[in-house]
Image: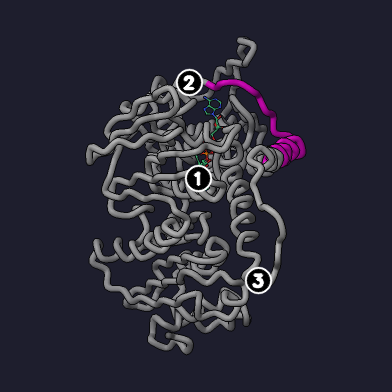
Amino acid sequence: MKIAVVGGGPGGYVAAIKAAMLGAEVTVIEKKRVGGTCLNVGCIPTKALLASSSMLMNIKEAKDYGINIDGEINADFKAIMGRKDKIVNQLIGGIEFLFEKRGVNLVNGFGKLVDKNTIEVTKEDGSSEIVKADKIILANGSVPVVLPMFPYDKKRVITSDEVLGLEELPESMLIVGGGVIGCEIGQFLRALGTEVTIVQRGDQILPFEDKDVAKQLQRQFKKDKIKVLTDSGVEKCEVVEDGVISTLSNGKEIKTQYVLMAIGRKPNLEGSGIEEIGIELNRGKIVVDENLQTNIEGIYAIGDLIDTPFLAHVASKEGIVAVENALGKSKTVDYTAVPRCVYTEPELAAVGKTERQLEEQGIEYHVGKFEFRGLGKAQAMGHFQGFIKVLADKEDKIVGASIVGPHATDLLTELSLAVHLGLTVEQVGDVIHAHPTLSEGLMEALHDVHGECVHAA
Ligand code: FAD
């Protein structure tokens, strides 16, 4: 069976390797470098940068731990960006190695769908190649949304694609959008010294999470001296000689060196041939059935192209399921336990339903909450702001959870497993959790659902 994959991001490259492991003859068509948004301008570079800013924040707190650091502490922006590039390159090399090991054929160029078995690839030198396949997996990913009132010049008015390639630390930046990308990049830049203002349309940053969760990060942003303007938007934006003047919805003007648009992403369909060959779209996203197949038999679509959470781990899971289905199975993806993570300081992580969703859906629920400050391990680490919140339905099933605090993104997995398997508060709360660990906080929050939390304040 010949399988062609358009796009080498976390959806496409995982699909390709899986297909090769299952015995298919696989070609990946990628116009840039493998790794996609995630590896080149997304998950990994942002986390590498946040590791640098977090290191700086920790060093500044060293005295609290009895460590004296003499002399000036400063951040070398170029070295930080260089470290990020090195990590990205290393990981890209890793994917290329895996392709070679599994015999995946990589064709560098822009892929355009011609029909259900044919992709025309235009290469950088202008030449073209035809790739034929029995089944095609579309994994073209997404691009940042750019609204017309922003004069997107890629120099002063930029998106996350450009911010990750800056050569100098900005003096000031207006970030439009307080979602995950805006929050992560904002905190990184602020830690290094940039004056950061975040403009957010609704009444909280991270609008998809519960208010108490977002508020905790907003409190930290206040300490960091990141200005957060909620219930506010940008009406107009003008590039001037030494920066950008933005007019806010309340009529106020704000001048910054840069404006970063972090207002969302949309499927990358331009020139792809997807619409031309009749693949069905709904509000700009490819429509797939529960097996991830499009309306054209044998063509599957995954990742940021379809109407499922725009996250790397979702794209990869869909890549595996699409390949299995292309090879004859009838698998589906269970989206009830998709982890949502924000890698700020403190970290945020959530899975399943939020309180807001449960209320909107009229589902009766119980809450268990535990503050990190009640944990010996968190106190010993000196990182104890935040809490763990568990939501259970009336049958005691864990239906959602949110964590704000140290290592939240890693801690979440136990609760993701619980939501995925439909485990009850009693089942997970019964597990002996090691002492002293941060995971004890999960156990305490679970016990709190039944009012049985021993260390409740
Ligand atoms: P992509 O990663 O976008 O890959 C698509 C690939 O297809 C690209 O390499 C592109 O060059 C190629 N391509 C497109 N069209 C063609 C064509 N016609 N021919 C040939 N090649 C083509 N997600 C997380 O889970 N965790 C995070 O921490 C996280 N952080 C992020 C931070 C930022 C700043 C951004 C922007 C995104 C972040 N994301 C994160 C989201 C994540 O990057 C995406 O959800 C994920 O990369 C989607 O994977 P994909 O394979 O669908 O598409």
Q: Main secondary structure of the magenta part?
A: helix
**What residue is rendered at 37% in x and 58% in y?**
209
**What residue is rendered at 40% in x and 66% in y?**
400
Please state which of the two labelled residues, at mark 1 or mark 2, is closer to the viewer.
Answer: 1
Q: Residues within 10 Å of mark 3 (few under 14, many from 20)?
A: few
Residue type at tag 2: Asp
Q: Which mark is residue 185?
A: 1
- Where are the magenta residues, as a range? 88-111
Disc 3 designates what residue? 65
Classify residue 348 as left or right of residue 366: right
Q: Is residue 266 visible?
A: no
**Label 1, ligand 1: CB separation under 8 Å:** yes
**Label 2, ligand 1: CB separation under 8 Å:** no
Residue type at tag 3: Tyr
Residue type at tag 1: Ile
Q: Say above or below: 318 vs 24.
A: below
**What residue is rendered at 57% in x and 29% in y?**
134
Q: Residues within 10 Å of mark 1 (few under 14, many from 20)?
A: many
Q: Which mark is residue 115?
A: 2
